Image (spheres, rainbow, N blue to C red):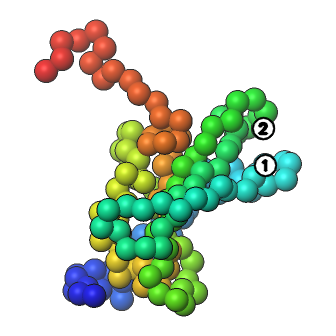
């Protein structure tokens, strides 16, 4: 597999590790914290196999059901969707890299093909987990008309 020299530099210099930490820290305030903070028994994620065009296997998709109101721990539940781009190596002792898309309304799972290419070198030693934040992708999507009451361009 041909690896981009710039990506190899990022990995070797620790920048990718720093990005992984930042992504994980952001994740811990949402997805992971929701799981850990729950007063009753922890919710288990539901996994199912999935395939993406031009994404080397192994891959799996899934969701975890969480309360819409995290503080109340009662009421309506919504699914938080995720995609796991598994390590392409048989041995991957490192923690996974979590990718959470930025910007309003952007779903991480929809970018699986691009992320698989960008982090191909990272997948040699760790899984890459893409999480659709609440209100994006397949995680209880919220759609709104940005031009409500205005002339559309």
The reply to whether discs 1 and 2 touch (Cβ–Cβ < 8 Å) is yes
Q: Which mark is residue 100?
A: none
Measured as percent of width and height from the top left, residue 146 is found at 30, 23
Measured as percent of width and height from the top left, residue 112 is found at 37, 60
Q: Is residue 126 above or below residue 132?
A: below
Q: Is residue 96 above or below residue 49?
A: below
Q: Residue at x 57, y 77 (%)?
A: 95
Q: Nearer the viewer, residue 84 or 52?
A: 52
Measured as percent of width and height from the top left, residue 33 is found at 67, 54
Q: Residue at x 61, y 59 (%)?
A: 47
- Count of numbered labels shown in the rendering: 2
Quadrant assignment, res 78: top right
Can residue 18 be seen by looking at this rendering? no
Q: Which mark is residue 73?
A: 2
Check the image and name the residue furthest to the left.
Answer: 153
Check the image and name the residue furthest to the right.
Answer: 40
Q: Is residue 119 above or below residue 136?
A: below
**Disc 1: which residue:** 38
Can residue 38 be seen by looking at this rendering? yes
Q: Is residue 79 above or below residue 51?
A: above
Residue 32 shown left or right of residue 7 in the figure? right
Q: Residue at x 18, y 17 (%)?
A: 152
Near mark 1 (Cα within 10 A), the count class, few <14, some 14-19 or many ≥20, is some
* Quadrant containing the N terminus in the rendered view: bottom left
Return the disc, 1 or 2, that comes first in the chain's sequence. 1
Q: Secondary structure at mark 2?
A: loop
Near mark 2 (Cα within 10 A), the count class, few <14, some 14-19 or many ≥20, is some
Q: Secondary structure at mark 1?
A: loop
Residue 106 shown left or right of residue 131 in the figure? left
């Amino acid at each position: 597999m041909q690896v981009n020299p710039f990506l190899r530099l990022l990995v070797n210099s620790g920048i990718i590790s720093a990005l992984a930490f930042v992504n994980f820290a952001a994740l811990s305030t949402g997805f992971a914290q929701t799981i850990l903070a729950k007063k009753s028994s922890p919710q288990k994620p539901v996994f199912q196999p999935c395939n993406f065009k031009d994404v080397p296997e192994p891959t799996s998709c899934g969701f975890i059901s969480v309360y819409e109101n995290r503080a109340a721990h009662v009421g309506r539940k919504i699914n938080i969707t995720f995609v796991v781009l598994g390590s392409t190596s048989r041995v991957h002792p490192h923690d996974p890299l979590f990718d959470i898309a930025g910007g309003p309304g952007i779903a991480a799972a929809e970018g699986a093909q691009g992320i698989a290419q960008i982090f191909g070198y990272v997948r040699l030693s760790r899984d890459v987990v893409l999480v659709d934040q609440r209100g994006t992708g397949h995680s209880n999507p919220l759609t709104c008309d940005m031009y409500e009451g205005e002339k559309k361009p």
